[in-house]
Structure formats: structure tokens, C-alpha cells
């Protein structure tokens, strides 16, 4: 059963590398500043438009000139119609003028364009008009007085009234009263338009993309591991989508690995059951035959049945032993023992173990150890077990009179051990599968094996931090690359 060797990436999160001009925060800030700038510009343009539309709002003249203009206008109105309603005329023509003024008439009325007029100005204007009406001498200049600017209204040489304008700038309350409602209403409308534009242009796209991200998360939660969030754009939401997609890809890889592991587990159970049942079935059949009291067996036939039972028992022991070895190797993690191991000594023990078969089949076992490859560090028992398995495999597939070669050569930081035979080689379609458990290229020729030998070899090499490969070159060639000092 294969291990899940690709865990989820749970390291420190990658820092956002979003360009500042594409950052969502900068876009919101710049959009807010831009909105304020547009609001100020529009308010200013509105103010200018209102001022131009109401020419009397801020007349481009001094207070003295304003007094003269109002006096001249009222004089013309009285000349056209002596019964004209001056109060209505002043409200209509000067109601929007922020600078207040007072008109004192001969009939004693006092008219003004503003609801509030300085009392001192009112009294001064009335006293001055009374003085002029009685024919008393008046200053050669009616203004500017320290209390205001004055201009008489005379029709056909008869004094009809007096216009008085206070000194200084118009009061702020008057300006606010004149422009406040319009500017406040326009500002509220602009705020509403700006809020709607921000929602559509700034918040809307972000909300839509976050909704897509949420939808992808819900789909993954429902088991659709192929769901992904769109990654268009270049801001923080895009970075979040990319991180989410990386997580989703990791989850999918983990799920695929779990599925593959489950299939491998089921296949392993089936293979183990098959491999164990084969000798057990044979043993049971022969034992049942031997146990039949009514069946008279020839001694030689009985001995053959007992020999077959013994062989099947030993085969069963080898399978169970190989399974235990494989389980221990894949579960122990680092190399349990680390000590100097002589390559030449291992080659000698392999030759001694297979000496009889080599002699009977006239197979030559060639050994070569290059300088710099005489020794490595590791578990001597496990390394010899791996080499013995490869040698036995090579010998099994080498025809009589062939050659098996054991060689060791130095590599960068390690040693390469090569086992070569002169057999038919490995069919190309099987090269990628020969290290799988219970896999047999030719089950008829390898009937005595468990199909676990090469799996055990790979597990031993992996435990030493090395790699093993297989290829064909005038026979099968197995190459083991081992580091000189395995990492604990």
C-alpha cells in the first residue's frame, strides 16, 4: 500500500506582491479622494453658476457703489410710476443680494432687502433723512460715514428717500441663508450619486468576485474538488483566489492520493490473499489425500506428496517473511543501523551463497569495485539483502553459460552498485512496474518467487536515501545509487 508522500502545503503564507496601483486598498483610497475632488469641483461650479444666474447675489462693486445703484434704480422706478410698490420691487430685485441695505422713504417707511438690518444703520439713515428733509446742511459727502454709505433718492428735485449700506463685508449668516439650502441639496445629491458610483465601480466588482470565491468554496465543500475561483485581476482578492486555488489543488491531490492508496490497499489485500491461498490450497489438498485411511498410497507417492507439502510450507514462510520485511522497511523511517559496509565483502558473500548454482549452470559471476567505491555507510544486513535479491533475480533470468556482473563505481557524493545479466531483459512495457508488490513479468518462469523481492530492494534503497533504476542493455541492468552517509 503506497504512502501519501505529498502532504498539503502548510508553510508560511506567501506575502502579497500586488503592485500598489492595483491594490484594492489603494483603489478604494484613491477613489474616495477622487470622489471628494469631484464633489468640490462640482460644488464650486454650482456656486459660480448660482452667482452668475443671480447677478445681484454678489455685485462686483463697493458698498458705496451699491448704495448709488440702488438709489438710481429706485429713482427710475418712482419716475415711471410714483405709486410703485417699492417693497415688492426691492424683494424681487435685491432679495438675493447678500449685502443688506436700508431704504428710508419720505412717508416714514423703512424698507430693506434682508430681514435683519443693523439698528445703528437704521437710526443713522432716519436721522440723516430727517436732517436733509428739513433743509439742514448735510456733509458734502454722504459717505462713507463711519457707520455706513448713503445715497439720496431725488425725483424732480424732491427728496423721496435715502439708501443706506453698512460698511464692511456682508454677514456670513446672510450668505448661508442665501446659498445654504441649494448647496446642501446639491451636496446631498452628489453624495448619493458618489455612493452609487462607488458601489458600482469599486464595491460591486469586489463583491462579485468574493461571491465567486464563496461559491467555489461551497462547491468544494460539497465534494466538487475540481471547482476553482477566477483569478482575473491583480489585487488582494486575486491573491486570495490564487491561494484558495492552490489549497483546492492540494486537497484534490490529497483526495486522489487517498483514492489511489485505497485502490492499492484493496489490490494488496487481493494479491496477498491470492499468494497465500495458492500454497494453502495445495497443502490442504495433499494433506486431505494423505489423511484418507481407506486410500492406500504407494510409499514413493506418499513421500512425493509430503515433499510437495513441505515445499509449499516453505513457500508460505517466504511470502510471510517478505511481507513482514516490507512492512518493517516501509514503517521504520530512517536507517536503523549506520556503520561502514565493504562493497567487496558483500560481493564475495553473494558469490558464496550462489556458488553451487553458478557451478551447475556454468554461469560466470564477474565482480568489479572501482577505486573510491570500496565502502559506504549503512545497514550491512539490509544492503546485503537487497544485493542478494538482485543477484538471485539476475541469476534466475540468465541462461546457462551466461554472465552476471556485480560492479561498484564512485559518483558525486556516493556509490553506484550495478547488477547486470545477459538474459532476455525486461519487456519495455514492464519496466515501470517491476518494483510493485507481487508483480511478475513472467509468472511461469518466476513461479517460485513471491513477487516481493524487488519491492523489498526498493524499500531498502529508499531507507538509505538512495534510488534504484532498471533498464535493458544486452540484458537487464539494475543500478542502485547510494549516498556515502545516509541522512538520519
Image: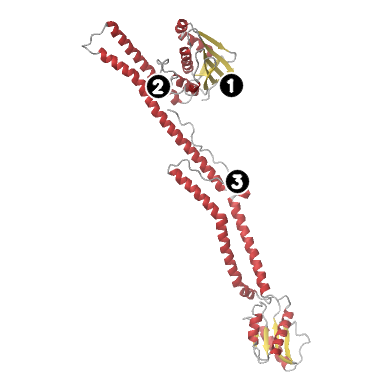
Q: What residue is rendered at 26% in x and 13% in y?
A: 289
Residue sitting nearer the eye, 395 or 472:
472
| Residue marked by disc 3 | 18
Q: Are marks 3 and 1 in contact (CB under 8 Å)?
A: no
Which x, y percent locates residue 236?
A: 56, 47
* Marks 2/1: CA–CA distance: 32 Å
Please, is residue 68 above or below residue 277 in the view?
Answer: below
| Residue displayed at 69% across by 80% down | 166
> Which type of secondary structure does the marked residue at label 1 adopt?
loop
Of helix, strand and loop, which one carries label 2?
helix
**In which quarter of the view is residue 161 placed?**
bottom right
Say which mark, if any, is on residue 413: 1
The mark lying in front, picked from 2 and 1, is 2
Mark 2 / mark 1, whichever is N-terminal: 2
What residue sits right under mark 2 in the picture?
A: 323
Q: How is the image coloured?
A: secondary structure
Secondary structure state at the residue bearing disc 3 = loop
Q: Quick check: marks 3 and 2 in contact, CB under 8 Å?
A: no
Query: Marks 3 and 1, Cα distance to the nearest angstrom?
Result: 42 Å
Tell me, yes or no, if residue 335 can be seen here: no
Count all numbered tags in the image, as a single digit.
Answer: 3
Q: Nearer the viewer, residue 125 or 368?
A: 368
Query: Could one spot residue 202 in this view of the protein?
Result: yes
Mark closer to the chain start, 3 or 2? 3
Q: Which of the two labelled residues, at mark 3 and mark 1, occupies the earlier sequence position?
A: 3
Amino acid at each position: 500500500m503506497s504512502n501519501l508522500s505529498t502532504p498539503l502545503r502548510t508553510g508560511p503564507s506567501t506575502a502579497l506582491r500586488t503592485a500598489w496601483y492595483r491594490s484594492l486598498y489603494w483603489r478604494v483610497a484613491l477613489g474616495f479622494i477622487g470622489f471628494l475632488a469631484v464633489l468640490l469641483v462640482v460644488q464650486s461650479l454650482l456656486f459660480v453658476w448660482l452667482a452668475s444666474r443671480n447677478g445681484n447675489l454678489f455685485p462686483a462693486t463697493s458698498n458705496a457703489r451699491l448704495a448709488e445703484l440702488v438709489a438710481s434704480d429706485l429713482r427710475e422706478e418712482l419716475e415711471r410710476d410714483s405709486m410703485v410698490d417699492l417693497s415688492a420691487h426691492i424683494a424681487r430685485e435685491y432679495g438675493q443680494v447678500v449685502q443688506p441695505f436700508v431704504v428710508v422713504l419720505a412717508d416714514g417707511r423703512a424698507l430693506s432687502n434682508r430681514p435683519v438690518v443693523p439698528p445703528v444703520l437704521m437710526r443713522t439713515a432716519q436721522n440723516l433723512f430727517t436732517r436733509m428733509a428739513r433743509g439742514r446742511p448735510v456733509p458734502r459727502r454722504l459717505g462713507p460715514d463711519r457707520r455706513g454709505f448713503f445715497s439720496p433718492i431725488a425725483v424732480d428735485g424732491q427728496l423721496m428717500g435715502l439708501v443706506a449700506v453698512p460698511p464692511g463685508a456682508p454677514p456670513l449668516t446672510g450668505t448661508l441663508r442665501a446659498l445654504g439650502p441649494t448647496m446642501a441639496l446639491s451636496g446631498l445629491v452628489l453624495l448619493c450619486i458618489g455612493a452609487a458610483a462607488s458601489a458600482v465601480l469599486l464595491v460591486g466588482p469586489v463583491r462579485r468576485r468574493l461571491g465567486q470565491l464563496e461559491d467555489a468554496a461551497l462547491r468544494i465543500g460539497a465534494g466538487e474538488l475540481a471547482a476553482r475561483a477566477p483569478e482575473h485581476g491583480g489585487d488582494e482578492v486575486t491573491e486570495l483566489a490564487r491561494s484558495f486555488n492552490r489549497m483546492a489543488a492540494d486537497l484534490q491531490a490529497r483526495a486522489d492520493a487517498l483514492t489511489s492508496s485505497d485502490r492499492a490497499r484493496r489490490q494488496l489485500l487481493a494479491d496477498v490473499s491470492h499468494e497465500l491461498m495458492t500454497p494453502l490450497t495445495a497443502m490442504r489438498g495433499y494433506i486431505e489425500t494423505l489423511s484418507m485411511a481407506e486410500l492406500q498410497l504407494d510409499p514413493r507417492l506418499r513421500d512425493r506428496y509430503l515433499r510437495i507439502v513441505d515445499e509449499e510450507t516453505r513457500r508460505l514462510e517466504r511470502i510471510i517473511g517478505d511481507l513482514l520485511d516490507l512492512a518493517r522497511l516501509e514503517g521504520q523511517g530512517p536507517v536503523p543501523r549506520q556503520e561502514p559496509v565493504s562493497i567487496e565483502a558483500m560481493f564475495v558473500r553473494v558469490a558464496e551463497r550462489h556458488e553451487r548454482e553458478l557451478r551447475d549452470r556454468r554461469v560466470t559471476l564477474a565482480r568489479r569495485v572501482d577505486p573510491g567505491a570500496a565502502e559506504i555507510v549503512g545497514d550491512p544486513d539490509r544492503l546485503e539483502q537487497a544485493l542478494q535479491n538482485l543477484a538471485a533475480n539476475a541469476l534466475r533470468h540468465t541462461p546457462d553459460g551466461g554472465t552476471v556482473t556485480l560492479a561498484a563505481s564512485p559518483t558525486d557524493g556516493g556509490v553506484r552498485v550495478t547488477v547486470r545479466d545477459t538474459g532476455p531483459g525486461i519487456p519495455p512495457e514492464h519496466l515501470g512496474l517491476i518494483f510493485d508488490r507481487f508483480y511478475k513479468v513472467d509468472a511461469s518462469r518466476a513461479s517460485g518467487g513471491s513477487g516481493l523481492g524487488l519491492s523489498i530492494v526498493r524499500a531498502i534503497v529508499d531507507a538509505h536515501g538512495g534510488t534504484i533504476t532498471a533498464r535493458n542493455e544486452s540484458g537487464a541492468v539494475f543500478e542502485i545509487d547510494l549516498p556515502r552517509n545516509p541522512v538520519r
